[in-house]
Amino acid sequence: MAKDAFNSINVSYKSIELDEIDEGRQLHEALHQLTGARTVSNETSMR
């Protein structure tokens, strides 16, 4: 998993569980429009 990979190389990250936040549906749709992917298992890096 991505979290394990980031942890193994001491990279800071923020994990957002879309099914646990109020804006999850909207964020999921925005990510779909940006990436074309519908699955939430995709990792997205934003600055």
Image (spheres, helix red, strand yellow):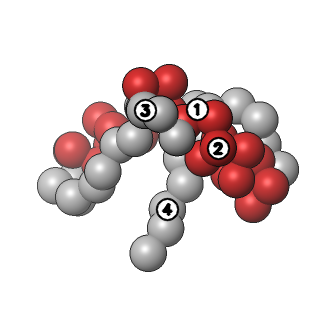
Which label number is shown at residue 26? 2
Residue identified by numbered label 4: 45
Q: Could you tell me which residue is drawn at 28 percent across and 54 percent down?
A: 13
The numbered mark, 3 or 2, whose residue comes first in the sequence reads 3
The numbered mark, 4 or 2, whose residue comes first in the sequence reads 2
User: Is 17 left, or right, of 43 in this rendering?
Assistant: left
Between label 4 and label 2, give the one nearer the viewer: 2
Label 4 SS: loop
User: Is 4 left, or right, of 33 in this rendering?
Assistant: left
Kindly report the distance in space between the C-alpha atoms of the residues bearing marks 4 and 2: 17 Å
Kindly report the distance in space between the C-alpha atoms of the residues bearing marks 3 and 2: 10 Å
The three-letter code of the residue at mark 4 reads: Ser
The three-letter code of the residue at mark 3 reads: Ile
User: Is 30 left, or right, of 7 in this rendering?
Assistant: right
The numbered mark, 1 or 2, whose residue comes first in the sequence reads 2
Instruction: Tell me the quadrant of the picture where the N terminus can be found.
Output: top left
Kindly report the distance in space between the C-alpha atoms of the residues bearing marks 1 and 4: 13 Å
In the rendering, at what x and y percent does residue 44 appear? 55, 54
Residue 33 falls in image quadrant: bottom right
Residue identified by numbered label 3: 21
Which label number is shown at residue 41? 1
The numbered mark, 3 or 1, whose residue comes first in the sequence reads 3
Between label 3 and label 1, give the one nearer the viewer: 3
Q: Could you tell me which residue is drawn at 49 percent across and 62 percent down?
A: 45
Vertical relation: 12 (above or below) 6 = below
User: Depth check: 25 or 1 in front?
Assistant: 25
